[in-house]
Amino acid sequence: DVKVTQSSRYLVKRTGEKVFLECVQDMDHENMFWYRQDPGLGLRLIYFSYDVKMKEKGDIPEGYSVSREKKERFSLILESASTNQTSMYLCASRSQGNEQFFGPGTRLTVL
Amino acid sequence: RKEVEQDPGPFNVPEGATVAFNCTYSNSASQSFFWYRQDCRKEPKLLMSVYSSGNEDGRFTAQLNRASQYISLLIRDSKLSDSATYLCVVNGTLLTGGGNKLTFGTGTQLKVEL
């Protein structure tokens, strides 16, 4: 069964902290994505990666960076968390087809 | 104009009712269309793809109108378990490395009541 896992379901951090969100997929997919989901704004693409060590900016990359050292793992990094980064973060992966499989999400609160 | 637009709802319907959602998209070059379902506090999951000729999966029917750039989802004989948010998804910009970026609508909330 297809599986995308995320390191935490809930996370509370303070302004200025460095935050790491981890995502692992077991489907050998080339493409992995990080989104944030906010009420009224829907899912917005932050970054994606199409191969190990390859990354591309999505629609809202400011304040974020990513790392993909292994094919199965894609990390989202908030260098200095701010309150406007409080959100639900969803990781997804897919092969060359269009169906994306999502992880369960991490609800991040920045105080 | 948003790339993908949906009525946020909520649509409150009695069990057994038929309900339809529409979604419009702005990129006329889009080739693939989908409906995803998202339960409360859960991740989105693919409900069904939408094909040019329209397609059906049990109680669910999806239609595409390329001329008017909208897609629809019809749910017949609604069940309590159909209560969820339905996301309209359209593929668009080609991504580096292959494949297309998926653009998600903000979703339409459905509440099926006794």
Image (cartoon, coloured by chain):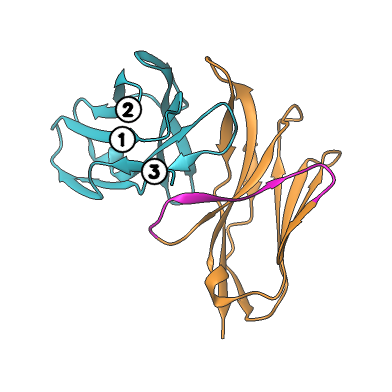
Chain colours: A cyan, B orange
Give the labeled residue for mark 1: A23
Instruction: Using the image, tell me which numbered label, if any, was put on residue A74.
Output: 2
Q: Secondary structure at mark 3?
A: loop
> For the residues marked 3 and 2, what is the alpha-carbon distance in whole angstroms?
14 Å
Disc 1 vs disc 3: Cβ atoms closer than 8 Å?
no
Compared to residue B59, the image places residue A86 above or below, namely: above
Q: Amino acid at mark 2?
A: Phe
Q: Secondary structure at mark 1?
A: strand
Dot 2 crowding, Cα within 10 Å, few <14, some 14–19, many 20+:
many
- Which chain is disc 2 placed on? A
Magenta span covers which residues? B41-54
Q: Specify whether disc 3 shares its chain with disc 2.
A: yes
Q: Amino acid at mark 1?
A: Cys
> Of marks 2 and 1, which one's residue comes earlier in the chain?
1
A9 with respect to A1 (left or right): left
- Which chain is disc 1 placed on? A
Q: Quadrant of residue A86?
A: top left
Q: Quadrant of residue A75?
A: top left
A38 with respect to A19 (left or right): right
Instruction: Using the image, tell me which numbered label, if any, was put on residue A3.
Output: 3
B62 with respect to A45 (left or right): right
Q: Where residue B8 sits in the image (x, y, percent)?
A: 58, 57
Q: Secondary structure at mark 2?
A: strand
Q: Where residue A106 sits in the image (x, y, percent)?
A: 29, 46
> For the residues marked 2 and 1, what is the alpha-carbon distance in whole angstroms?
5 Å
